[in-house]
Image (cartoon, rainbow, N blue to C red):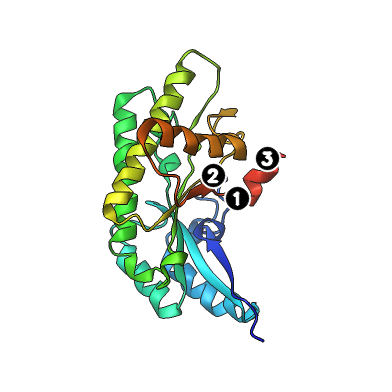
Amino acid sequence: MAAKKSLHSICRWTFNPGKGGFVPADMRPEWGGKFSTADMIKLVKEKITPRLPDNIQLGIEMHYDNEVNEKTAPEVADALVDTGIYLAMITPGAHVHWGYGGVASLDTNERKAVEDFGLRTVDLAYGPLKKAWHPDAAKAPSLIIWNGSFGYDLASVGIRQMYQNLKESIAGLCKYEEEKGGSLYIGFEPKPNEGHPAMLIPTVASAILFWRKIEEEFGISRDKKGVNKEFGHSEMIG
């Protein structure tokens, strides 16, 4: 009897150019710019896949726009197709550019810029990266919402408005994705800190409640919405 397929994914984040995610970018300058996301995919195929049991099916996770963007997406998609590895997840890496609220920001200019950033992430998934999706619609990629900006350093009366902004903006993102096809699974990745001492969506329960609230307030269906229980952030929660 054949073993049941087990789905796993590897993130581009793990394979930074000679450094972790929270150390200086120039820690190993001789590596800088010499290990692209396409290179990482080929490395996974060559070095990691052969070590896995036959029932393991791999996917790749990546952040827009520092790990994949409009310029690199065709090459990345080709690498995925050539290696037989699928796009498992894409997420707006807005934390690379905005640190004071993102789509929850009280700054209208920042908020609009980050909203547009999220829409471009969806465009990329449905555009050049679409050919790297799993052919089974039930195994379509996830669009994960995570941002170290969704938090605050000091409690203030502005927190209520930040939370409302977050709901409105994510509802808009969900509506846009639905117009594109509604095929992606959309998940919220909670974390209690990292980015700011306190976060707007700190726990699994708060993420579940978030989806309930935007369904009630904005008519966003909870179908294909969920929680991304990333291991390290789950450890933070305790």
Picture disc at residue 230: 1
Question: Where 191 falls versus 58 (above or below)?
Answer: above
**Distance between mark 2 and mark 3 Cα atoms:** 12 Å
| Amino acid type assigned to the residue bearing label 3 in the image | Met
Q: Is the Cβ of the residue at disc 2 closer than 8 Å to that at disc 1?
A: yes
Name of the residue lying farthest toward the bottom: 1
Residue in the image at 40% along x and 79% along y: 82
Q: Nearer the viewer, residue 59 or 74?
A: 59
Evaluate whether residue 203 shows in this view.
no
Residue 236 - label:
3
Sequence-wise, the earlier of marks 2 and 1 is 2
Type of amino acid at the residue the image marks with label 1? Glu
Q: Say if 173 sits above or below 4 in the image.
A: above
Q: Nearest the camera: 213 or 129?
A: 213
Name the spot of residue 5 as percent of width and height, x first.
Answer: 59, 75
Q: Is residue 95 left or right of residue 126?
A: right
Q: Residue visible at 30% across and 67% down?
A: 74
Task: Please indicate whether residue 16 sits to the left or right of residue 66 in the image.
Answer: right
Residue under the image location 45 percent in, 70 percent down? 86
**Badge 2, how many Cα within 10 Å: few under 14, some, many 20+?**
many
Residue 134 point in image, percent of width and height = 42, 71
SS at mark 3 in the image:
helix
> Residue 195, percent across and down?
54, 34
Tell me which residue sits at (43%, 29%) in the image: 101
Residue named by callout 2: 189
